[in-house]
Amino acid sequence: MGREPVKGGVAERASMEPGHSGAMISVELARALRDAGLRWKPETGDRFVIDKPEVDQDVYTLAEMTVEKHDFPTGAVLGFNGTTEWALDSVAEDEALWIPREDQLRELLGRAFVGLTRVEGPAGAMHTVTARIEDADRTFAAADPAVAYGEALQAYIHASLTI
């Protein structure tokens, strides 16, 4: 993760390159969650990408000093404060794709969340999220716990919409 200096603060920016092993879900999983029905109400500390080809590799963090939410009658706009040297001044909320953090994914699972286990193996650690979906415990395993939470949440949303 790199730091991009901006006037009035520092915006955190991380790469979403294939094979990225940080504590973030992929853009593809974030899109799948959004498409399944997950809605975002931007808050300070939230991470997002601009959901357009060739620019969805840069992850931004919503911060009052650098990227701030502005509410207008026509909808919310995410403003990039103090970035006069950069061509991007603001982006409409519907052009931004939320990349929920691990803690946010766990919170969104709510009462469906049963547990998280971590098992060390020859290829490294695997994290398994257990969620109660349609009256059955289902497991979702991934090397990154955020991914396991994201996959569990996606299944939970799909099941909730089909009941």
Image: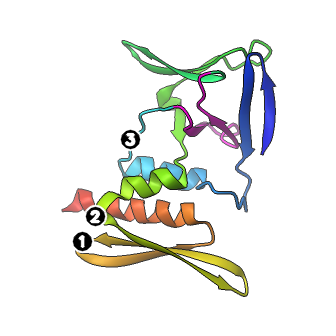
Quadrant where the C terminus sits is: bottom left
The verdict on residue 147 being magenta is no
Q: Is residue 108 left or right of residue 22?
A: left
Q: Is residue 64 above or below residue 162?
A: above
The amino acid beneath tag 3 is Arg
Provide the secondary structure element on which disc 2 rests.
helix
First reached walking from the N terminus: tag 1 or tag 3: 3
Q: Identify the disc placed on residue 159.
A: 2
Q: Are marks 2 and 1 in contact (CB under 8 Å)?
A: yes
Provide the secondary structure element on which disc 3 rests.
loop
Q: Is residue 52 left or right of residue 39?
A: right
Q: Is residue 124 above or below residue 46?
A: below
Provide the secondary structure element on which disc 1 rests.
loop
Of 56 and 11, nearer the camera is 11
| Callout in the foreground (2, 1) | 1
Q: Is residue 37 above or below residue 4?
A: below
The image shows residue 142 at horizontal and vertical percentages of 58, 72
The image shows residue 47 at horizontal and vertical percentages of 58, 40
Tell me which corner region of the image, top left, top right, bottom left or bottom right, holds residue 144.
Answer: bottom right
Q: Identify the disc placed on residue 104.
A: none
Figure colour scheme: rainbow
First reached walking from the N terminus: tag 2 or tag 1: 1
- The answer to whether residue 97 shows anywhere in this view is yes
Q: Residue at x 48, y 63 (%)?
A: 149
Q: Residue at x 24, y 71 (%)?
A: 134
- Residue named by callout 1: 134
* CA neighbours of label 3 inside 10 A, class few (<14), some (14 to 19), many (20+): few
Q: Tell me the CA gap for discs 2 and 3.
A: 16 Å
The image shows residue 110 at horizontal and vertical percentages of 33, 57
The amino acid beneath tag 2 is Ala
The amino acid beneath tag 1 is Glu
Q: Identify the disc placed on residue 39.
A: 3
